[in-house]
Amino acid sequence: MANQDEVRPLTFNLGSAEKLSDGIGHCFVVCGEEIAIFRQRDGRIFAVQNRCPHKNGPLSEGISGDGKVVCPLHSHKFDLSSGKGGEPRECLKTYAVRVFNGEILLSFPTGDAAAPEPECAARHA
């Protein structure tokens, strides 16, 4: 039986995975947050916050490949799996995403589960 204090993520169906093109980002708005979804050429799918923490650039418009995305405004690189950028304490919020029965399913954290990782806390202050 689940603990009443346990926080469960919300799951959103973002539609058909067929609309995802390899290497091209797509922006979705979920619970008021812009989320960039990327499908790599090897089939892996990633979801991160759409706005770059440095200059607020739209990451969904950046170049992606090899599990990374490059911000279109200032060329900072971010790892799509961990969210980590090239500078200390510069990282993106990441989201669990998968394809099930041809549909893109995004897990959106709620409550304490939405808190940033400690090394990323400074950008959320």
Image (cartoon, rainbow, N blue to C red):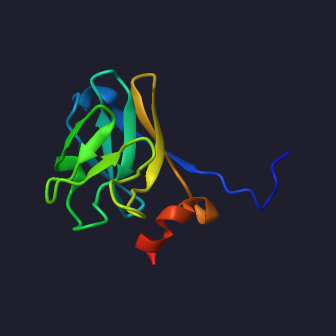
Q: Position of residue 28 (x, y in %)?
A: 30, 50
- For the point 40% across and 52% down, which residue is it? 84
Quadrant in which the C terminus is drawn: bottom left
**Which of the two residues, 58 or 12, is positioned nearer the viewer here?**
58
Drawn side of residue 19 relative to residue 16, left or right: left
Quadrant in which the N terminus is drawn: top right
- For the point 34% across and 35% down, which residue is it? 67
Q: Position of residue 33 (x, y in %)?
A: 37, 61
Q: Position of residue 89 (x, y in %)?
A: 42, 64
Q: Seen from this angle, which residue lies furthest bottom?
A: 125
- For the point 60% across and 59% down, which residue is it? 113
- For the point 35% across and 36% down, which residue is it? 15
Q: Quadrant of residue 124?
A: bottom left
Residue 116 visible? The answer is no
Asked if residue 100 is positioned above or below residue 93 in the image, the reply reads: above
Asked if residue 52 is positioned above or below residue 2 in the image, the reply reads: below
Q: Position of residue 71 (x, y in %)?
A: 20, 53
Drawn side of residue 107 relative to residue 2, left or right: left
Label count reads 0
Drawn side of residue 29 relative to residue 107, left or right: left
Q: Seen from this angle, which residue lies furthest right?
A: 1
